[in-house]
Amino acid sequence: MTEIGTRSVTGAALDALADGFRGELVTPDHPGYEDHRRVWNGSIDRRPALIARCVGVADVIAAVRFGRERALPVAVRGGGHSFPGLSVVDDGLVVDLSLMRGTRVDPAGATVRAQAGVLLGELDHETQAFGLAVPSGIVTHTGIAGLTLGGGIGWLMRKHGLTIDRLRSVDLVTAAGDLVHADAEENPDLFWGVRGGGGNFGVVTEFEYALERVGPIVLAGPTMWEVEHAGPVMRFYRDWIAEAPDELMTMLVVRRAPTIPAVPPEIQGRRVVVVVSCYAGDVADGERVLAPLRAHRPPLLDLCRPQPYLAHQALLDPSFRPGWWYYVRSHDLAGLTDPVVDVFAEMGPQVVSPITSVGVFHLGGAVARVPADATAFGGRASGHTVNINGNARTPHEFDVEKDWARRFSEALAPHAVGAYSNFLMEEGPDRVRRSYGANFGRLQELKRRWDPDNVFHLNQNIPPAA
């Protein structure tokens, strides 16, 4: 008999699941258990009772039914990249999709189908072979599943929209263990919900996206100044982006200059304010658009240059390595008002860890032109999304970084207009509700229809309507 949490499951039950299961079933006595239970955020240390490493839809169906029949808490893992570690659970079942890595590009139709275990870098690799791309995130080892289901912000969004704005269909295993298809014509309400509503409605096993022509060369990279200039840099930046074309996506960052070969040794470790740019258009046009940024104040270092889109997508990978300790707080802002700039000018010089950072994503453009109720995503009217990372490479540094992130968040809170669900920790129902705004009631009704028992609750949870 195998103990699963406080519940007993007979060996025959596990044998029945294993019969016909093409993937791998990992229990605590399995030699690979320690590796398979680990997720990207090293601060998460949870011990599931069973990890079902699925290789196809039939495996997913079998695992979901097994978990539901035995009332096990069910976590779903794609890339395992969620900040709060919601893809792993103590004493429960992990439906692990990481082996489902198939990708198929249709260059003529400008679409791509990708299974739920695919990572952003893998998707980009396949699509850029044809000069095409899906707007996605900013770290290549992020899973496409969690990123997409939460909305998907990244370097192409002002020109081509969020990741969900390029989503054309999904295949999904429901809480009842049934496979359904959802697109604009078939199950349209469900399709509305998965575009921003997270993993609340089932396990998406495959995504279909429309592709956009991108690169392969883009004008992109960081331009940095000493953090002492954060105030004037941000005020200039605020005015400059007000007239920015959709092709230009920028992220303002406060951090220590990273220890990477591209940064000279005498600059590494210095506190800096950075504008990271990506111009999704003609490089010569981008040079003209970026000229005022470079001219307003001599930068400490300028690495913004023509480069492969794939290289730019991997720019931040060294700053978010698997196994480090991550803690995040987040707010949406309407704009970079003087009081907001003052918070950054005060908190930026207090950065301690070389991997702690705060990033301010510039929204607007194509993101804002989609009606607020067209998808479940709740932040289209915001001007910026702020991601405050209190990160550490070892556990003993972590408390200091978490404290900095909390203080930064508290100082910004009076200016917040919402939050991005993919950047939430386990902060409670009020924060989740606020991240969806006026769409929350419709999401609760949808949850009642597709998952009335809240089987899929290990997420930024939307409880079913009463």
Image: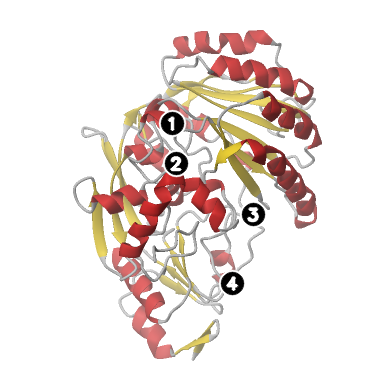
Q: CA distance from mark 3 to mark 1?
A: 28 Å
Q: Position of residue 356 (x, y in %)?
A: 71, 41
Sequence-earlier tag: 1 or 2: 2
Mark 1 is surrounded, within 10 Å at the Cα level, by few (under 14), some (14 to 19) or many (20 or more) other residues, namely: many
Q: Are marks 3 and 2 in contact (CB under 8 Å)?
A: no
Relative to 171, is 18 above or below?
Answer: below
Which residue of the protein is positioned furthest toward the left in this rendering?
185
Is 412 placed left or right of 135 in the picture?
Answer: right
Q: Which one is in front in this view, the residue at disc 3 or the one at disc 1?
A: 1
Q: CA distance from mark 1 to mark 2?
A: 8 Å
Q: Which mark is residue 152?
A: 2
Q: Are marks 3 and 4 in contact (CB under 8 Å)?
A: no
Is 199 placed left or right of 91 in the picture?
Answer: left
Q: Is residue 123 visible?
A: yes
Sequence-earlier tag: 3 or 2: 2
Q: Are marks 1 and 2 in contact (CB under 8 Å)?
A: yes
Sequence-earlier tag: 3 or 1: 1
Q: Which one is in front in this view, the residue at disc 1 or the one at disc 4?
A: 1
Q: Which of the 4 image quadrants contains residue 222?
A: top right
At x 67% / y 52%, what residue is drawn? 324
Secondary element type, mark 1 = helix
Q: Which residue is mark 1?
A: 157
Amino acid under disc 2:
Gly
Sequence-earlier tag: 1 or 4: 4
Q: Which one is in front in this view, the residue at disc 3 or the one at disc 2?
A: 2
